[in-house]
Image (cartoon, grey):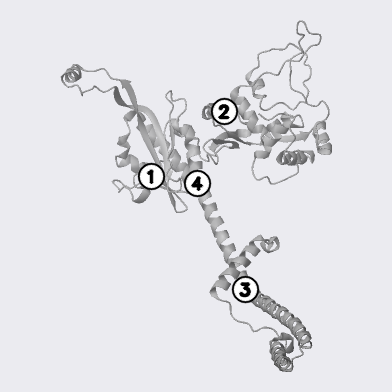
Amino acid sequence: MVALDTPLNTRQLEVLGWVGEECPAREWPDSTYKTVAIALQNRRLIAISKKGGLWSASILDAGRHYLDHGTYPHGHLKPKKRSGAPNQAPNASRDRQAIRPAARNQSPTPTPVQTPGSGEPHAPTSPKLTPTRQLLRDVAEAGGTLTRNVKGDNTPYAVRVSTINRRGMPPDGQRLVMETGATYYEKIFRLEDRPVWRTMPPREVVDAPRIGRWHPAVTEIRDDGRSTRFGTEVRARALRILHAIATEAAARGHQVSAPAKNAPRGNGYYAHKETGQLIINIRSHRFFVSLHQLDDYTPHTPTPKELEKQRKWEWSRPPRWDITPGRRLRLRVYGDLLRGWDKKWADSKTLRVRVEDHLADAIQIIEDAVDREEARKAAELRAFEEENRRREAAEQLIEGRHAENMRAEALDLQLADWQHVTARRQYLAAMAARIDTITDEPARESATEWLHWCERHVDSRDLLHRPLAMPARRPPTWEEHSSLLREIMTELAADPDYREH
């Protein structure tokens, strides 16, 4: 849980400053700024209004103080006394304000209570939120995205997320989503917009007295006998669900068709999965939609024949359950972009939650998979083009870099030769001084002859006695070319000026 007196993060400061400027027109990347605004309202820094169905926000004095000084006003978040009778039973609307408080500058707190035997009254703690509301508040306080390590935590987060969404607790028509992070135990809770269903609501399609014009793919399934796989009690409902999916997909510009009757089951990795009632094609990607009638299991009462067989043969056992086609349906979507995972939704046992309630999620999952794939391909293409651009730029710089390297190498060699010649001349000077001390004439002549040869040899090796010019150029070897190419491409990738161009 995030404490109310925690300093604001960068995202919260950005939204607070935007509200302080009276919410000028701005293109936000998503609607999470409203979730951040709720967190600021919980800290009593801004006030949110939805009068007339229009969302608006205004900054409070405490918010101005935080923008000016970077801290909360003194005593800002201390509980305040409440007039009236405490301990009143909260109704549904007041309970909802635990997540979306009204635009007042204080939250209701009980009157301080005098403890027997103590000299001063103390203020009791505020009412504890339910686990689901506490989870939703934690996500709101985190700015709309909360990451939590659940290792060793037995909390049924999936149930709580389902309860929050079923009761419509998230603000502004959003929903709470739980995903797995980098590790199995890392769970990410995120508030996002609900998927939009553009055509007639699915429940209304299924419950309508009649359907004027069926989708051609569903008509094909109905007329060629493939709908007989469903029992008579669910057949009409199954066809209407398929009709709702096909109509919605067609309204979004996708191609919808029915698999050919008695068609082969496909090939490759997805051969066992290329079945179903509908095929949705989105930009060369295929997705399969399948409805399946679930069975009901009732305890089996052994018949006399089964009991007799069990007495005769020890290995014989009567079945435990009687299996009969039920009234519940299960929806599956799968395809080449879902990485082998089947997304499934089923009717609840009481049919209070039905497959129709998840059709928007099914369409959203398919479209999100395509969008992610297209974004991945676009990113790969941009990276490929950028690498080629750097390679072309590097190829133009290789010749000059190689020439500079050759000159530097020539300079190092000449410097080494000059240092060597200088050391030799110092030695010859010491040799001449030694010869002057030799008194034996034959030995003196021999030493002098050797000194003259050494001087001629050193003069021939002295680079300063030769014409000075730029060293000759040669083409780089394959190893030099590859090394320079990698070196220059790395430098260009790290150069901010190059990236801007």
Q: Earlier in the sequence, mark 4 or mark 3?
A: 4
The part of the image, by quadrant, that contains residue 461 is bottom right
Q: Are marks 4 and 1 in contact (CB under 8 Å)?
A: no
Q: Are marks 4 and 2 in contact (CB under 8 Å)?
A: no
Q: Quadrant of the C terminus?
A: bottom right
Q: Which label number is shown at residue 217?
A: 1
Residue at the spot of label 3: 398
Amino acid on which disc 4 is placed: Ala
Label 4, label 1: how many angstroms apart (C-alpha)? 23 Å
Q: Nearer the viewer, mark 4 or mark 3?
A: 3
Amino acid on which disc 3 is placed: Ile
Residues packed near mark 2 inside 10 Å, few (<14), some (14 to 19) or many (20 plus): some
Left or right: residue 242 versus residue 482 is left
Relative to 395, say whether 57 is above or below: above
Q: Earlier in the sequence, mark 3 or mark 1?
A: 1
Label 3, label 1: how many angstroms apart (C-alpha)? 61 Å
Relative to 288, say whether 434 is above or below: below
Residue 106 visible in the current orientation: yes
Q: Earlier in the sequence, mark 2 or mark 3?
A: 2
The part of the image, by quadrant, that contains residue 28 is top right
The secondary element bearing badge 2 is classed as helix
Q: Earlier in the sequence, mark 4 or mark 1?
A: 1
Residue at screen point 53% across, 53% down: 376
Residues packed near mark 4 inside 10 Å, few (<14), some (14 to 19) or many (20 plus): some
Residue at the spot of label 4: 369
